Image: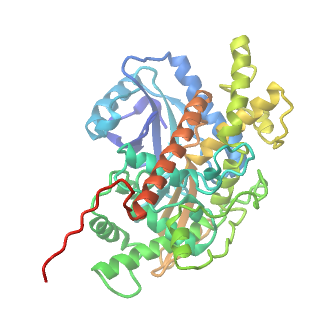
Amino acid sequence: MDEGKMDENEWVYHGEGNKSLVVAHAQRCVVLRFLKFHPNRNKASEEILQHLQNIVDFSKNVMKQFFGENYVHSGEVVQLPLDFVKQLCLKIQSERPESRCDKDLDTLSGYAMCLPNLTRLQTYHFVEHRPILCVEIKPKCGFIPFSSDVTQELKRKVCRYCMHQHLKVATGKWKQISKYCPLDLYSGNKQRMHFALKSLLQEAQNNLKIFKNGELIYGGKEARDSVADWSELAYHLKPFFFPSNGLASGPHCTRAVIRELVHVLTRVLLTSTDKSRLGTWRAVPNTQGPRACEASPFSRQLRCQGKNPPEHSGLPKGCLLYKTLQVQMLDMLDIDGLYPLYSRVERYLQDFPEQRKTLQIDGPYNESFYQKLLDLSTEDDGTLAYALTKVQQYRVAMTAKDCSIMITLSPCLQDESPGQRAVVPSSKSRLAFSVSVLDLDLKPYESIPHQYTLDGKIVSYYLKAVRAKDAAAVPPRFTGNEDCTLVLHKV
């Protein structure tokens, strides 16, 4: 990239989260990621540079080690002309969602991250002139806590995601509870995975987005009429999954196209595209913890029918879902067991604040930081070192619980040989695909108290919702002190 010849008209708004905003180049497969701040909170340029460099280092030296070379794209920090950044900020302002405009794009430092555009196939630097579909899935936490430190028995039966849905609906974030349960997706069982992916498509919330040729076409907003949304989605998907039944339109065509998408996504998620030496690394034995969530609609439906849940197939060790789950399982103590250890580190830092750098709380995220994460002991010897290791492992695990998986698909030409590109068959043709992992910024050390409070609130709301449901299911009975009037009608 030639930073000296930057034209804001070559860049388009791509999306944003709470902490950063992304723009994509119209012709090249690259994006720029800028940090965002509240209007009255301007940071020094050196501080922003260090923050961005920490993100790159953590991705390169830690997450790439866990996930593998092919799945992680670390990018690099670039310095851009301030004029370009200011003009770009003005150009995209009207496209930003109103709910995100409480923070402004950083226009003062000139620093940003340059990364590959993961909504495109990762084998070409320039945009290809063929349809490209990208599905972004935020799978969330795929296991139920197995730690002896868990204080609420409910947490051993119901997964965090299913419980959290009740709090989100109660606080108005979402209108209805999703049928998606992460444990179904991580099961490796195709029947459960199909159900999970269909549930995400029905109620995407912010856990699923679909891009076509780099533009968002589905998800990322409050659901409207799911039938109309699916019909519109099927229209976009037909170039990739034209139904084998030959129908060109109508509800049967829509269902056939969606079903084909779900089958292809499942197949890709169970495929390994990275043969890294760390593919067999495991945080904990796979046998720990229950393999199904009691709140999953899939599991509930089977229980109502008196059927046993389908066999837990497990995930192939090289696939990205397996690797994601293993990193998540670095949270071996749950927040209940972790919080006292965080408090131990906090007490030490209050007495010796100058030690924060030595303890690598804010970096550097180098090889030595990574090596300490591999200590999987759970015997507390009362030391600061033990507490710090568990705190850092928890932060990495929380990062993996909130990451996104990007699956990019593009039809192969009839006479095209796959070459180095991974290919998955579909009913219409073969599809070249690439799989990547995104959103790998290390979760802040300071967020641990919030996570502890939030965890208690999630459990509390779920218990309240379950009690209300149970009470509604019991028919009302007269109590002894209530008046009862018998009315007789003349026949």
x and y, in percent, of residue 304 in the image: 52, 75
Residue positioned 49% across, 38% down in the render: 1
Q: Which residue of the protein is positioned furthest toward the bottom in this rendering?
A: 245
Residue positioned 57% across, 79% down in the render: 306
Q: Quadrant of the C terminus?
A: bottom left
Picture quadrant where residue 422 is located:
bottom right
How many numbered dots are placed on residues in this image? 0
Image height check: is 259 above or below 335?
below
x and y, in percent, of residue 343 in the image: 69, 25
Residue sitting nearer the eye, 392 or 12: 392
Residue sitting nearer the eye, 299 or 243: 299
x and y, in percent, of residue 75 in the image: 57, 40
From the viewer's perspective, is 466 left or right of 386?
A: left
From the viewer's perspective, is 454 left or right of 343?
A: left
Scheme of colours in the image: rainbow
Q: Which residue of the protein is positioned furthest toward the left in this rendering?
A: 490
Residue positioned 61% across, 62% down in the render: 186
| Residue 138 in view, yes or no | no
From the viewer's perspective, is 284 left or right of 328?
A: right
Picture quadrant where residue 307 is located:
bottom right
Image height check: is 326 above or below 302?
above
| Residue 343 in view, yes or no | yes
x and y, in percent, of residue 329 in the image: 70, 49
Residue sitting nearer the eye, 434 or 266: 266
Residue sitting nearer the eye, 425 or 78: 425
